[in-house]
Each structure stands twice: as structure tokens, then as C-alpha cells.
Image (cartoon, rainbow, N blue to C red):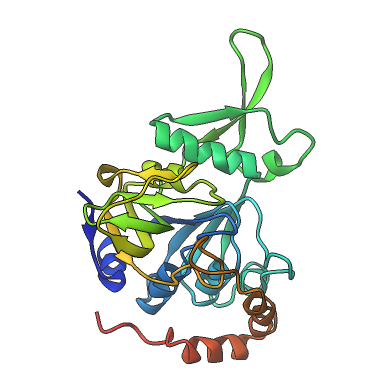
Amino acid sequence: MARILALDEAIDELVADGDVIALEGFTHLIPVAAGHEIIRQRKRDLVLCRMTPDIVYDQLIGAGCARKLVFSWGGNPGVGSLHRFRDAVQHSWPVPLEIEEHSHAGMANRYAAGASGLPFAILRGYTGTDLPAHTDSIKTVTCPFTGEELAAVPALNPDVGIVHAQQADRQGNVQLWGITGVQKETVLAAKRSLVTVEEVVDELTPRPGAVVLPKWAVTAVAEVPGGAHPSYAQGYSERDNDHYRRWDAISRDRAEFEAWLDREGLAERSAR
């Protein structure tokens, strides 16, 4: 049964320096509060994995938490670039950042292989791109039945998978609905998992099209209302578009970014 913990307790227990971690959520249900707690606790040398790293990964990178980013697209959606990400790659500030770039399909298949207990995934992809020349984890295999050459990517099994959802019950079963990405695959592929939720309820009410993560697949649940802000949680909150626009100006300047860390209470380690 998944344990219900406070967010700071969960991050302190589950995330260690040097871990490979994935905070997943596709536009919707992004686990931003968990990312901020990782910054607050000064976790370091992390390998950050995400299909679409947006501003919470920009913040983690700018705060010096990451040594590597494994991703398929990075940007401030609807606004522009991730300036802390760019500064780390181009100028090694605050620390150098290694990158490993894939396509969306490649990353999704890596999570699916990890969740399935397979060593790698095969897909028709990367054709016409130069990613295989720059990414060592993209190989080719020949189909033993047709002779077709296909792309192969290794399974992704994070040390910690972190997602946000709408609800969990008191036994740790989780339910999320609306736009979903690879949250299910991330939790099933990870060695340890944390789900932050809008609320803990006595009993989950089945919803058409919902994804249910059973208690045996989840290490810990933390009740964090608004934990996806500035992204949204369908049925609970709307996307804060102004926040994304404001981030562009904040992230362009190192001093302004550091002032933002101070204002948000992320510059000092939590009491734990």
C-alpha cells in the first residue's frame, strides 16, 4: 500500500543526490510543487528526464539541481525559450548541463519499455533527422522477419517517477483524468514513485477515460492542493497563462532569477 506523506517528507526520503528522476505531465497535471521542493531541499547532480521540459525544469536547472537533461522538446509553451536551460548549456551557469535529446515518440517508447520490463523499444522514427548522430542512446536494429531497419532506444527506468493527479484514496490508489501523457508509464517504470494529488478522498469515484494507478504501483502519495500550478488540474484549476508569460522576463536575467528564488522561499533548505 502506498504511504501518504507530507511533500517535504516524501522528497527527503525518495529523492537522493545523483538520482535519475522524471517529473511528467503533458501540459496538464505537471508536478510543479514537487519540483519546487526538490529545489528547496538542495538536491544535486540529478539526471532530469521529461518529454516536454518547461518552466519547472528551467527552475530546477537554474537552481543548480541538474547535471543532465534527457528530453524530447524544451520550451516555455506559448511563450519562447527556457533561458536558464540555455544559460546552462551555453555558459555552464550555474553548473554545466549535459543533454540527451530524443523525439517525443522515442521518449514515450522508452518509458513504455521501462514499464513493460523490456530492455529497449523499437520504433519507426528519427528518419531524416540528425539526432542519431548526436545521441548515443539511439541505435538501429534489423527486423528478423522483414529485414526492415528500425530505430531502437533503451528502456527508461528512473530512480524516482513523480506525477500529479486529481485524487487518491486513503489506501494510495490514484485516479487522474483529462489530458494525460506518460504518467502511468513513468510510475510503472520507476524504482520509486511519488504522486502529488489535489485531494485525498475516502473512495475514488470511477470516471470515464480516467487512468487509475493502483496502490501497489505507487510508493508515496502527498496531498498538495494546487500542486500543478501554473499548469492546470482538470476539475480543480485553470492554467495560469500570465505566469508563463512572466517567467520569460524572470528567467532571462541571472540576478532576477536568483531574486525569484528568494521571493518564492526556494533559496533556503526546508526545515527537514
- In the picture as drawn, the residue positioned furthest to the top comes out as 145
Q: Residue at x 49, y 58 (%)?
A: 48
Q: Residue at x 40, y 71 (%)?
A: 225
- Residue 218 x, y percent position in the rendering: 30, 49
Residue 166 figure quarter? bottom left
Question: With 41 as the anchor, is 163 left or right in this view?
Answer: right
How many marks can you see? 0
**Looking at this view, is 206 or 199 the one in front?**
206
Do we see residue 16 in this rendering? Answer: no
- In the picture as drawn, the residue positioned furthest to the right comes out as 128
- Residue 65 x, y percent position in the rendering: 45, 70
Question: With 35 as the anchor, is 168 left or right in this view?
Answer: left
Q: Residue at x 66, y 54 (%)?
A: 73
- Residue 92 x, y percent position in the rendering: 60, 72
**Looking at this view, is 161 or 30 the one in front?**
30
Question: With 203 as the anchor, is 54 left or right in this view?
Answer: right
Residue 268 figure quarter? bottom left
- Is the C terminus in the top left, top right, bottom left or bottom right quadrant? bottom left
Do we see residue 178 in this rendering? Answer: yes
Q: Residue at x 61, y 71 (%)?
A: 88
- Residue 115 x, y percent position in the rendering: 41, 37
Whether 199 is drawn above or below 104: the answer is: below
